[in-house]
Amino acid sequence: MADLLGQDPDTTQELMHSWAAQLSARAQAAADLSDRVATIAASAVGANGAVRVTVAASGALTDLQLDDRVQRIPGAELASIIMATIARAQAGLTEQVSIAVHDTVGTDSETGRAVTDTFARRFPKPADEQPDRWEREARNGW
């Protein structure tokens, strides 16, 4: 056992301590990432600010604010605006998670890539959207 890895016992012990320290540091970074991701939230607006949403790290809607201007928007169109706004907020989660990954485990780590890829798959960036009729009208003063 003293000849572990072909090293003398002191060198082997130093190597083992070094590996243990690296594993401990990686575990701590992963725990830090988990803590940060748990507190992430993202917001987005639609209809030129008449619709505001916030989502938690899970993607669940945690806040919905509707300005009185939405009363002019037919129900089906308002629902579509709200859903598109939620999707934009959820896509914002991916951006925030990428920052948290960079700051903790690193973007080149296996853990970092796995977490970032998971969020990117769950909450893809919406295709470039053209402003809806209500967005254009809101810009023109409703």
Image: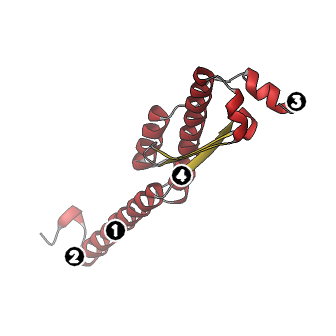
Q: CA distance from mark 2 to mark 4?
A: 50 Å
> Which badge, 2 or 3, is on the more N-terminal residue?
2
Foreground mark, 2 or 4, reads: 4
Task: Give the amino acid at mark 4.
Answer: Ala
Task: Give the amino acid at mark 1.
Answer: Ser
Label 1 belongs to which residue? 24
Task: Give the amino acid at mark 3.
Answer: Asn
| CB-based contact (under 8 Å), mark 3 and mark 4 | no
Label 1 neighbour load within 10 Å: few <14, some 14-19, many 20+? few
Instruction: State left or right for residue 40 relative to residue 75.
Output: left
> Which badge, 2 or 1, is on the more N-terminal residue?
2
Foreground mark, 2 or 3, reads: 3
Label 4 belongs to which residue? 41
Q: Secondary structure at mark 1?
A: helix
Task: Give the amino acid at mark 2.
Answer: Pro
Image position, residue 121 (x, y; %): 45, 32
State the residue at coordinates (22%, 76%). 9
Position above or below: 60 against 76:
below
Label 2 belongs to which residue? 9
Please name whichever residue, 66 or 27, is drawn nearer the observer in this view of the structure. 66
> Which badge, 1 or 3, is on the more N-terminal residue?
1
Please name whichever residue, 121 or 84, is drawn nearer the observer in this view of the structure. 84
